[in-house]
Every structure is written in structure tokens, then in C-alpha cells.
Image: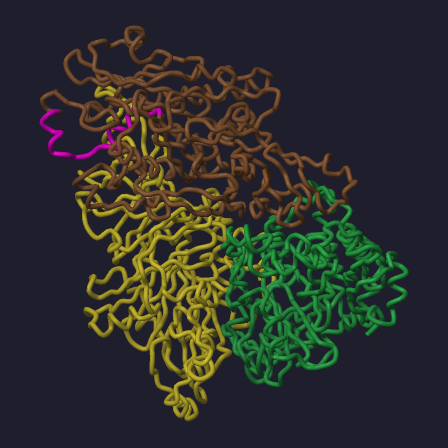
Chain colours: A green, B brown, C yellow
Amino acid sequence: MLTREENELICRTGPGTPMGQLFRRFWMPALLMSDLPEPDCEPVRLKVLGENLVAFRDTNGKVGVLERQCPHRLADMWFGRNENAGLACAYHGWKFDVAGDCMEMPTETAESNYKHKVKMRAYPAREFGGVIWVYMGPQDLTPELPQLEWARVPDDHRVVRSWLQDSNYLQATEGEIDSAHVTFNHRWFKQEFVPAVQRGQANRVTGNGGIMNYMDGAPRLTVKETDYGFVYGSRRQVGENEYYWRVTQFLLPFYSLIPGPQPPRGGRCWVPVDDEHNMVFQYSAHPDRPLTEEERQRLSASPERLYRTTFTLPDSTIIDTWRPERQRGNDYLIDRQMQRTQNYTGIASVREQDMAMTDGMGAIPERWREHLGTTDVAIITARKILLRHARDLQEGKEPYAARHGDAYRVRPVDIVSNEGDFGKLYERHADLALARV
Amino acid sequence: MLTREENELICRTGPGTPMGQLFRRFWMPALLMSDLPEPDCEPVRLKVLGENLVAFRDTNGKVGVLERQCPHRLADMWFGRNENAGLACAYHGWKFDVAGDCMEMPTETAESNYKHKVKMRAYPAREFGGVIWVYMGPQDLTPELPQLEWARVPDDHRVVRSWLQDSNYLQATEGEIDSAHVTFNHRWFKQEFVPAVQRGQANRVTGNGGIMNYMDGAPRLTVKETDYGFVYGSRRQVGENEYYWRVTQFLLPFYSLIPGPQPPRGGRCWVPVDDEHNMVFQYSAHPDRPLTEEERQRLSASPERLYRTTFTLPDSTIIDTWRPERQRGNDYLIDRQMQRTQNYTGIASVREQDMAMTDGMGAIPERWREHLGTTDVAIITARKILLRHARDLQEGKEPYAARHGDAYRVRPVDIVSNEGDFGKLYERHADLALARV
Amino acid sequence: MLTREENELICRTGPGTPMGQLFRRFWMPALLMSDLPEPDCEPVRLKVLGENLVAFRDTNGKVGVLERQCPHRLADMWFGRNENAGLACAYHGWKFDVAGDCMEMPTETAESNYKHKVKMRAYPAREFGGVIWVYMGPQDLTPELPQLEWARVPDDHRVVRSWLQDSNYLQATEGEIDSAHVTFNHRWFKQEFVPAVQRGQANRVTGNGGIMNYMDGAPRLTVKETDYGFVYGSRRQVGENEYYWRVTQFLLPFYSLIPGPQPPRGGRCWVPVDDEHNMVFQYSAHPDRPLTEEERQRLSASPERLYRTTFTLPDSTIIDTWRPERQRGNDYLIDRQMQRTQNYTGIASVREQDMAMTDGMGAIPERWREHLGTTDVAIITARKILLRHARDLQEGKEPYAARHGDAYRVRPVDIVSNEGDFGKLYERHADLALARV
């Protein structure tokens, strides 16, 4: 649990909040590159950390991320004209480039110097790993891009998707470093699994660690803090002196890397939109080769269907985003008959199973009412690390990971081993999977 | 009228409010028994007195009413698995029985004692009269079920329906102890009524006291406080020395009993969902025999059509409920031509006529702007009694009616009499209809 | 820009606010006469300056504007019966005339004097120029109707339309005294315009000043304060020593008059509904003759399509109003291909081009973040005048224009002239177009 005060501190990321300031020290995924598919295409409305923004790709292919309202008289720049290397407000033609500099101010006379005095708030943007990243912090502290493996591979090695979820970023993030829930929330009652589990000969049948996750619902977690956040090992007993280990990272401020039996592997991050919504980015990549069409389809199967839409946030801001067809308002299309006979939740797809849990806590959960257990160690650690970094920053201590992109060059792994101690396991396999990649 | 302060005091029933504490001393209708039709059926989301709850019927047929969020990490228990005599959270399998005790905590090791330390808030539930009742007060003060006649009869003697209304409970309750409005709000311009009324020979043509209600729009009300709340007589002059009396009860905290020419008879109660919505329970029963099919249909005709739906409350909570097809958002399908020629409101059904009036005051009416008249005596009394009981409870005085279920064994009556004094009428007919039943 | 405090002061018009008090000194358009088409027709729900009202046309054709809730028990008078020269509440039959006097109180005995003690808040209404006007200020200060030319002409000389917009009244009003935006926001890329503009021989092709507006995006504005508000000249250079002048009025508290090449001419006003919505009234009239059918259609072409609907305001009030089919929720049906090739915005109709800009600022813009330019002189002046009048009124100084309807007898004009000085132009053409009409 957290106190009410801690919960406020960790959930609020708007301008001026301590956690918002911490997040503003990092590059953050803001859009898919494909959301701005070509030069001079339609701008996109977005909100990040409670700030209303508009993104556009200019004539030269450069991406700009500007504040949403024109600095002149606050018209919505999204209605603007994206042409000739800038975005012109549709009200009076004031035109800005990707850096926020005013290119044209045609309501002033040719001699006027005014356009050099008006600058739009513009946030630096980068394209990397299929994603448009934005940096919303102080210019002199511009961080390094996190050198995550999925982002570093060639484009055809990767699938990235994004969608809007109906909760604060934190419980969504927490769901990903919670090894135990896989045993329940994502369980399928497939007949063919049963004999193998009974024989203690579980094979890895599906992604997400396969059915060995079903063999022990009380995994033992060991957390090891690192320069990027932490790595933890989740140990399940799957035979006598035989352990199924899942080794998962939490990378500041909101990334996960999820182990699987073989590549492609992936994870997710949860970028705060406002305090009651987050934008998920889901990435999967093969480190060594292009994805096959079958892999591409499989990696795009959960959430089941995404659709492009406008969405009106509680403060009446309209954004352009992706939504999963199964969502809070339709109870994720839960099927109680399926829940009785086929899987634990009655919800057909893994991501939506997660969403039902994390959205269902309410937009901002009342964490002071929780009763955490032994499998919540990683969640507890993530909260501590986030709060500590936010407080440290208030005292002038900058976050290490923001300035060290190479710290993110790690890889998750799952493995069956007779080693029961995470420290030793970690050392033993450092060469294989946990090393910098 | 009430002062602003009194209005706040009487309308707010959330946790910690004085009126909320009073209501928490009583059993309250929460659902229809048929909303949980069989063992291990789908759970139901509800809100009572501002508290988010989930109800389920377990494998043994017992009903549980639990807080909505799992005590572990606050996932929504409605997504849970209802099986093997308990409701298991779909996130980590923590399973609770109808008493809120933790049956399984599979994320902890077998030796762990933690499951005995975590208890879910569970409210006692009872099934009685077709209704699932809940008690949300202190355990050592558990009240008696109100022994209302409609609830005591065999199931085939009774019809109960429920639906969600768009207002605070109070104005809905007030509408039922307001004899005068029947003359106007529920008036039909049927040609066949006119001669009888003109001759002073009104017969009782329909329910709701029939057309004698149309003969005198300024009934004289006499209120008599009782142990269960009050009874009042509403006297209309229908001939020389001839009075049409309607004798109606208000029973704490929110029940009405409505007289009619002959059984089946009924009434309603209004259970606060939050401060801006209430759940109506409408009951009708014959004391002596099963209802005929024709009676059953007639008693289910108003509101005209109810449908099962999810509803999102202002705080974003989703509940499962019944809604009338005619509702605030569609102006109760008012028909102005009907209003000119057929009835007083242009709304086809009695209940929706009431709803248009009470919802139309706004969720919480500004009662300090009212101008009450002589026919509002019963309403004034109900407010006084509610406020007095709430204040008494703050000073430690428990409400009598909560602990004396037999106090509710009363029956409404309407009668034509030459007796003009309510006190004498009440005595004279005590043996017939006003007696304990 | 305005400070936060000034912005609050100028935008808030609810009861008790300084700006609300100023507005309450003027007659204000509330409905179209055609919204209440005949005696005893259906009442209409409206909100003006944050006050919930109901309007009806009684049996004698007189219009009443009453508070929305019955003074008895606050039922919604809109459900009432409009008959026999009054509106009767559908709850208990209390009936009120257009003056708010209680005609019948049938729940009281015949001898009762109570009905003479209960009065409904009723605002004086007038019919003038196709519009129903309401006055919501102190009775002893009843103003004169503004003698606007479009309102004074015979009915067949005029088109008036109204619709609900999603913003505070102020930015909508400002858009109309912003000559510069016409060059951009309303620009069409018609091939036939180009040669004429290039030759410096622009003719007036359409309304709104025609294509000479396209020839100079930095018009020079000169403002002259007047008894009704101000008039300003907007001067565009269209040839050597040749100026295209647009002379436009801002009339207190919210009227515009827009020049055009020849009559019919018109303008708009923006009446606050609440602080986040306004009701536009758009008027066009020929001073000298009935409109042709072609003119009538042209003057009703923007907004493109209006539909009659109910609308739920943020406080849950339901009003009856007109809405443009192109609206904020559907991005005014913007067409990016049209924006690339046909006009500046991709929005097909002039009014919706304006709405996209003013609604898009957010309901109440953060004017302290503006960067105003030289073409914003009229806007700056309007703000100053409104704020000054509001402050003056707080000190007891009544607004002159409210009591002098003839001050509104002015006419806008556009003209090509070699006169470069607005003061001289104004004098020279006083006899023609700027004179009292």
C-alpha cells in the first residue's frame, strides 16, 4: 500500500508535479512513426503528461511537436495547414516550424520584427524504433534515447502498436512486473496442458512463459536494483530441484521487458496522457532477423482489434488515438461461458485481460486500501524507486538512467534451471541473456 | 422549504454523513432476487449509499454483497469467478466467501497465514419478498427485516420490479406522500368519467383511487406520527357530507404504501444509489391469493418497459441495473397532442409521469426556493422525521423502527365515508384495514 | 492578452457577476420568434446568462419567459400545460401567466389567499425583428430595444437564424471584429480570383468583402469609440493610393455589423448561455425591399445545415436549441484534401470556419498566454470597453447604450477609396452609410 500522499505523488504527472518533473527528464514515446505517415500529412492531436500538443511531419519529413494552441490568439493548431516546412494556423496564417520558430506572421507588415519575438513551445522529437519520441524537459538536460533492443533493430525486425487505456499509468505499469498474475489472469484451460503439468513435464506451449506459469501460483520474487531501474527473478517450482525462472526488467520511468521461450520478445510502456489515461506502446522484435508474416500477425493479435478514433478527455480536449475494440465501456466483451470452460477471465485476449484488471481499479486506485503480498515485491520496489527518484530530483539529483541510454541494453529471459538462487543465476547467465545487448 | 443546510443534511447519504448513518441502521432493498437467478451466476455491480459493491449468488445459493474492489490490489471483483462457494478475483485468484472471509490466497505459500488476516468488507444479505436486502451498519446493531405485508405473502401473490431513477432519493420519496398531485399529474380526460363526476357519483374506475381523486384538487391532509414513521389521511369532498379518504403510510426510511380500491395493493421505496440517483423498488401484492396473469401484467405496465443495462454513474462507476425506456434523456417520450386531448402530462404511464416531475427538479433540488402549500403537510412531516432521526442518531439515539420489524405490518386504505375527522376515522376502521396485518 | 483576473471578469456572466450584471442591463436575443410558432404551442427550454428558463407563447400570442422550476416544489415547468393564457405546472396545476403571476393554485381551497403571495420570476419579453428579446435586469431600469436596422425592416426583408456554439461568448464575439482573419481563415483558392488580384483589379466577387480581402493580410485598423461601442476601419492596400476599407461596428454588449459589397447586409451577436456555450443570432436584411428566394437561400447557407435538438449542458440542464451539423465533435467535417486544393481550412462553410477557430480555443481561452498583434486593435478595444462598462456599473454608472436604442441605427460599409485616413473617410461618407439609419 501507499499512503494517500504517496499515491498522489506517484500518480500525478502534470506540469509542476514532482513525478511530472521526473518524467520530463526522459525521452518518452508519443506516437507511432506511422501515425505521421508522410511529409505534409494531417497533424495529430495528442496529450502527454497533461499537456495538449499537436504533432506534424513537415515537408522535409521532420517531426514537430508543438503546443496545441497558437500563441497568437490560441486557435487550435490542428486545424492548421501543414505545408512548405511548417504548420500555419488556420486563423491568421501565423506559421511555425518544427522548432517552434515563427516562419511567417502575415498579419504584420513586412517590416515588423514581431515574428522574431513570438516562439511557440516546441518539444524536441526523435524517430527511433518505429516510435516518435518527445522530450519535454529543460533543454540543457536533454537525455539520451534509451537504447532498448527492440528499438535498435532494423524496422522489419519489429512490430510496435499503441493504444489508449482508461487508467493512470501506474497500475498499468505495475501489471507488467507482477509475475504471479500470469498464473491466474492469463490462464487457459487447455486439455492438452493438463497431462504435462501433472507429469511435471510442462513444455513451453505458448508465449508468456507457457504453461509452466500454471504450475506455481506463488512464485518467489527476488529484486535486484540496477542503473536502469531493477531486474527481478520470479522463480516457480516446476519439478524437484527444478525451477522455472522469469527474469524481467523494469526500466525507468515506465518500460517493461517480458521474457518468452524464444524471440521475438517484447514488452510495453505506459506513457501518461493525463492522470486518468495512459498511452500504451507495445513492442516486439527479433534481434537477429526480419519477422515472418505469421509472427507479425501473432504479435498484432492482442489487443485483438485496434481502431483509429478521436477521443474526448475529461477536460474536453479531443485527441487522435487508437482504441482497442474491447474496452472498459463494453466490459472487454467478457463471455461468462468462456470463463466457465475456456479461460480464467472469459476475456479472449491477454492484453484485454490485463486491461480489465488495471482499468477496473478506477482511474486512480486508492492504494491505501491495498493488502500487498509476497508476490508484490517488484511492484513495491518500482513504487519506491519512482518515489525516490522524484524526491531526489526535487533535491537537485538528476536521474542517472536518463543520461545513459546504454543502460537500457538489457534483455529478459526465462529459463528452467536447478539454480534456486537469483544472484547466482544472474551471474551464471550474464553471458547469455542478461548481458548488455 | 428547507434551508440549504437542512437540504444537504437530508439529501447526502454517503459514508460518514448523518443521513447515511441513519439509513445504515436499516435493511435496504438492493436487488431483485431474480437479478441473481441461480447459483454461480454472473455477479452484479451495484452502488448503495454511495458505496461500490458487487453481489453474487454462490454455489450453495447464498447471496454475498462485497465491496467492489479486491482488497489485494483493488481489481474489480465483478470480473471474478463465481464458483465453488466463493468469488475469486480474476487477477490473482484471491477468493472470498459471502461473509468476506478469504478462502484461498494462491499467490502465497501453503504455510502462509496471510489469508486469515485479510478480510473483505461484506454486508449481510437476506432474501425476503422477492428482494435481496442488505444491511450496511454496525454488526452489533443488526436490525429486523421490515415485516411489510407485500414481502410476507407467498411469492405468487406478488410482483416486484426495480429501476434506476435520475434523482436524489428524497424528491422521489416525497412524490409518494403527496396526495394532491394525483388530481393533476395523473389525470386522464376520459369522457366516461365526466358524467359520474358531475353527478357526484364517482365510482372507482382505475387504481390510484380512481376518479374521485379528480373531484377535489385541494385535499385536506391530517398526519399522525407512528412508530414506523407516519400515516396520513387525505380527505377529498366527493358529495355533501361525503368524503373520499386516502390513508397512506410513510415508513422509515423510504417506504410508501398506496391505497387502492381493492387488492392487489402496493407501493414503492427509493434506495439511494449515490446522491444523484436512486433505485426504485415497486411492490404489489394480494394478501390472500395468487395474482392472476391479468393482474401481473397490469402491475408490470408502469413504467411501461424496463430494460437491463449497464449505467455509468458520474464518478465513472459502472453498475448493472434496470432502466425505464421512457427516461429523462428522451423527455419520457412526451406527446404534446396527448397532453392536449388525453391526459394532463402527455406522458403515457403513471410512473413516468411521476419521474418527469421528480427528475425534472434537478438531481438535488434547491429546496430553499420552494413555496409549500397546505397539501404538502405529509412531505413536511417526512422531512422533519428524517432530519430528527438523523440528528437523534448523532446523539446516540437509535431508530426504533429499525429494531421492530412488526411495526411495518400496516396496510393503506381508501374509503368513502361521512366521517370528516381523521382521528375518528382511524379509530373506526382500525379493525378493518389499519390494523397490524 | 488579459490577466487571469481580467479574463475571469470578462468571461463570467452568471447571476451576481459584474459582467453578468452589465449584460442584464440590455435587452438580449433569446429565441427566434419562429421557435414559438403559435399560441399555446410547446414551451421551449433555454438558458441565458447561466439562468435556466422556459419560454412559452400563450393563448393570446404573448410570450412569457419564466424561471424553469415551479416555485411550489421545483418541478420543471417545461412539462407544463400551455393553455388558457397561462402555463400550468404538470405536477399540481399551479398556473402562471407571462408576467409570472399565479392564475390558479388548485391545491389550495377557494378561499386561500396564497396564490397572490407566490410569484414566479418572469423576465419581460419583446418580439422585434424576428427575435424574442428578454430583459433580465432591474424592472425600473428597463432599457430600450436596440434599433438595429435589420430588426426595424419588415419581416420579408430579413433572415434570422440561431444556433448553439461550444464556447464562451467572448471569443465568438472577438472573431467578428477581427478583419485580418478574413484573409486567411475564409480564403478560397478560386482560379478566377488570381488574375484580378494580380492585376490589382480585384472585384468584389462574393460577400464578406470579396477577394480584395485576399490582397492584404495585414490590414491597418483604426478604432473610434462611439456611444454604442465603437466603429473601426480596416484598411487594405489594393492599388497605388487605393485602399479597400471595411468599416465595422461593435455594439454593446455583443453585436456586430459586417460590411458587404451591397445589401442585404448582416452581422451576428453571441448571447451567453452559460460560461462555456453561447447562442448565436445571425441576421441579414435588405433595407429597401423584400429578399428574393435566391437571397434567402444564400443567407441561410452558412452554417450549412442546422437541426433542432435537445442539448444537455455540463450542469445536466437540458435545453431546446439549434445545432450546426458541422460541429466540434465531428471536427466540422474538415476535409484535408479540400484544404490542400480549394480553401484555407478544408471546412466548407464560412461560419464553421469561424467556429473551428473560436471553439478550438477551449471553452474559456487562457488569454494570459496570447500574443496580440497590430491587427488585434479592435479586439483589444472591445475587451477594454466591456471591462470598463462592467467596472463602471459596479460603481453605479449605468451603460448609456442600454437606454438609447437609437444609438444602434448605424450601418457598416465597405468601400474602395483613395482616402487613407479613417477619420476623414468617416466624415466624408457619413451621409452615405455611417449615418443613423
Q: Is residue B231 above or below residue A153?
A: above
> How far across and down, in percent of the image, does residue B305 sit?
32, 43
> How far across and down, in percent of the image, does residue C63 sit?
25, 46
Is A35 situated left or right of A123 in this image?
left
- Is any part of residue B123 visible from this angle? yes
* Residue stretch rendered in magenta on the structure: B177-196
Q: Is residue A43 above or below residue C359?
A: below
Q: Is residue C285 above or below residue B79?
A: below
Q: Is residue B184 magenta?
A: yes
Q: Is residue C236 magenta?
A: no
Query: Can you tell which quarter of the image residue A40 is in?
Result: bottom right
In this view, the residue in front, B191 or C335, is B191
Please identify the quadrant where the C terminus of chain A is shown. Answer: bottom right
Residue drawn at point x = 30 percent, y = 48 percent: C44
Residue drawn at point x = 44 percent, y = 42 percent: B321
Please identify the quadrant where the N terminus of chain A is shown. Answer: top right
> How far across and down, in percent of the image, does residue C136 sit?
37, 44
Q: Is residue A338 above or below residue B64?
A: below
